[in-house]
Amino acid sequence: MIRCNDVQEQAQDLTEAFFEQWRNVLSTGDFILGEEVTRFETWLSGRCNGAQIVSMNSGTDALILAMRAVGVRAGDEVITCANTFIATVGAIVAVGAYPVLADVEEDELISLQTIEPVLSDRTKAVVTVHLRGRPVDMVPITAACRARDIAVIEDCAQAIGTLIEGRQVGTFGDAAAFSFHPLKTLGGLGDGGALVTTSTKIAEYVRGLRNHGLRSRDEAFGFGLNTRLDALQAAALNIKTHYLDLWLQRRRAIATYYDAVLADTTTGSDLGRGKAGSAYYHYVVRSHRRNELQQYLAHKGIQTAVHYPTPIHCQRAWLASRSAVSLPVTERLAKEILTLPCHPHLSDSDVEKIAVAIRDFDLK
């Protein structure tokens, strides 16, 4: 089976390097924060144009603390999209705010045009999701929000390596949340995340909140969380950072091949349509016969996935407590999208086999 992700292969390739690095951590006893965490934060700052980094144990916690840092409080409205992982909306709910869902464009991304109809006097923040590693058009969104005194938080969980005019996303809004879950392009061997911000005030506030709200061992300025990045996970991530650019290069090469070979099929190429700066965390096509295509590819030994089959406003979690929402583009795309394998462990023959199978299905 050609797998849709490469979590196991990647971990096996680097096993000895992980063990060696972990032995170093064990010998120092530096288990909470410490040198490995500092190294990783320094590296990520370099990737993010010198922005300040506060590492955490998940991207979800980074979203929660980002909202607390920009002043989102109970009863405020926060706008985001519904075709994202449940954590995006879950973080809004976790701070007591009310999630307001905007529709998306045909490229699956939120835009100023889809946000504007749901803006209100109660809007406190907008969470833009760089879905699948595709860059949201941040400049008009941030300009419009700043003119209204609305905070902008970037959900970059899938967007390490995603660029806007050569600049890493996550540095356009007031704060951003990155995830280093094992499935991510840069993933640990467990949970991990980071808040990125160009604001010293936000960074200092969140740095305290991630560590119980402590200023020192015995002095707390507020009630925070225990959401520090584990030193062993940081050590694993520090090894993987050396390979990230090669992995991103391979993903983009595979996407370029798919674009060329699938362009004239009914399935077509990635919904991002070769959007500049994409990191291709997912390569997603659409088909009116999506389920049939997925079954056909499985029969050919090709694993695919649907991210995400049920938009958040159609989930029981939403319907049990929120008003019904109509998002026509989001709903239509959810019935047609299919994620193809697009990761560094695919061989050229694997990629060719996938493309040939889709073209063969097109002729059925």
Image: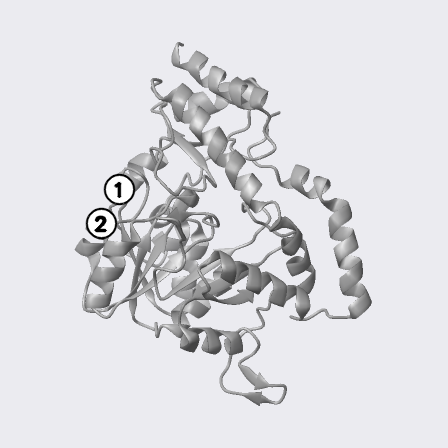
Mark 2: give few (<14), some (14-19) or many (20+) Cα within 10 Å.
some
Tell me residue 222's x, y (percent). 49, 84
Q: State the image quarter where residue 263 is shown.
A: top left
Q: Quadrant of the C terminus?
A: top left
Sooner in the amino-acid sequence: mark 1 or mark 2: 1
Using residue 325 as the reference point, say whether residue 358 is left or right of it: right
Tell me, yes or no, whether the two marked residues, 1 and 2, touch with CB atoms within 8 Å. Answer: yes
Q: Which residue is mark 1?
A: 105
Q: Which mark is residue 145?
A: none
- Mark 1: secondary structure: loop
Question: Which image quadrant is residue 143 in?
Answer: bottom left
Quick one: SS at disc 2? helix
Evaluate whether residue 57 shows in this view.
Answer: no
Q: Amino acid at mark 2?
A: Thr
Tell me the kind of residue under disc 1: Glu
Q: Say which residue label 2 marks.
A: 114
Residue 147's place in the image compared with 272, above or below, is: below
User: Would residue 86 appear left or right of 17 to someone viewing this image?
Assistant: left
Q: Nearer the viewer, residue 335 or 206?
A: 206
